[in-house]
Amino acid sequence: MAQITPDMTISSVVDRWPDAARIFARYGLSCASCSISKSETIHAGATGHGGGRVNVEDLMRDLNVLADSGKLPDNLPAASATASMGGMKMRGMAEQKGIKHVIAVMSGKGGVGKSLVAGLLAVGLKRRGFRVGVLDGDITGPSIPRMFGVREKPPVAPDGKSLMPSFSRGAIPIMSMNLLLPDEGDAVIWRGPMVSGAIRQFFSDVQWGELDYLIVDLPPGTSDAPLTVMQALPVDGVVLVTTPQALAAMVVTKAVKLVKQLGGEILGIVENMAYVRTPDGSHIEVFGPSQGLKLVIASNAPLIAKLPIDPEIARLSDAGLIESYESPESEELIVNFLERAPEKHPQVAVA
Ligand SMILES: Nc1ncnc2c1ncn2[C@@H]1O[C@H](COP(=O)(O)OP(=O)(O)OP(=O)(O)O)[C@@H](O)[C@H]1O
Ligand SMILES: [Mg+2]
């Protein structure tokens, strides 16, 4: 007998089989993450939000494959065919604009080094010849422009309708709300719909040029703010950042759940501030022992880097010189990212 039936609530199914959220998302029911799902049955969800387009029979079959085997079925509807993670329209626009992959950097907790990892990814990929841009999705913080030492206001494009991004010293295009504010210190307090509107415009109305990767720095948290940004953009993959504190690890588990609910893929986990290197070469684990293994189990994604606390990072990012930072660990981050990434080699321009 089927373990999952249409009269069960979406949330009860997701609670018991967390991966079911991915199946719901693939069927266009990314509302598995919204509060309605607490009381909504699968049948109501599929016939309501799905606008009657959801094939309930197929959905039930796939859910029960998961319940019976513990594994996701092989032939789920393609992610691009659903309304999750930015939706079809934004995906189509990405193609039109020549932006191949949108990668979001996320964490549960604030201050763990999201912006740093977004910066290091961009810098490392650029060094390897990829075309990379950075979209600052944290509209309240100045981290990205500051780290890259960018102050120049994004100029209006020649068409008079769109904006050019600002460029870092190393020619990485960057767009941030902070660059549009009269004063760097001006905080923006906006409601969700305005944030999604702004983020969408950062994507659609900015002349990024052709990009292999657009790296998106998300705002902190596992609730509305990062969710709003992720839903506004056609995100392909997510890199999760944490520190070894148990608490941070727990919050990351929540982030993992959120990404799954949106039908997204976690490419890898970065453990930041994992240790301090002493002059004699040994490591001190300031924030306690690594939680890497726990995170790998919780997210089913690999640990792609363990970054030490490095005064050089703090110094260079404060000075706007993150592009000068080099370390074996940040190299490893790029190597491992590319192992998992959708695009493994830069397009070599033919002369
Ligand atoms: N491994 C590290 N070694 C030294 N300093 C670091 C390291 N990682 C981050 N920092 C510093 O810690 C501060 C917070 O980092 P960052 O801004 O990247 O975190 P965040 O997660 O983006 O924060 P927020 O949640 O506020 O957006 C920055 O000043 C950064 O330079
Ligand atoms: Mg940040």
Image (cartoon, grey):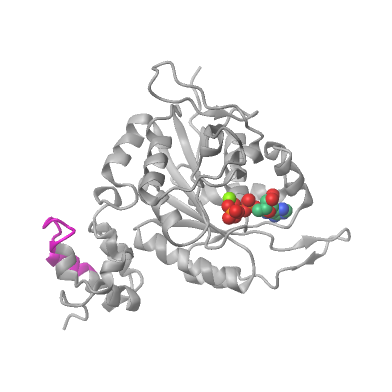
Q: Is residue 318 left or right of residue 215?
A: right
Q: Is residue 52 magenta?
A: yes
Between residue 284 and residue 34, name the one nearer to us: 34
Residue 309, placed above or below residue 123: below
Residue 190, placed above or below residue 308: above
Which residue occupies the extreme right position in the image? 280
* Residue drawn at point x = 47 percent, y = 49 percent: 104
State whether residue 74 appears in this view: no
State whether residue 203 appears in this view: yes
Q: Residue 318, percent across and down?
A: 72, 43
Instruction: Tell me the quadrant of the picture where the N terminus can be found.
Output: bottom left
Q: Residue 210, percent across and down?
A: 44, 28
Q: Residue 146, percent across and down?
A: 65, 39
Q: Residue 264 appears in which quarter of the rendering?
A: bottom left
* Residue drawn at point x = 36 percent, y = 72 percent: 18
Q: Is residue 1 magenta?
A: no
Q: How many marks?
A: 0
Image: magenta residue range: 47-62
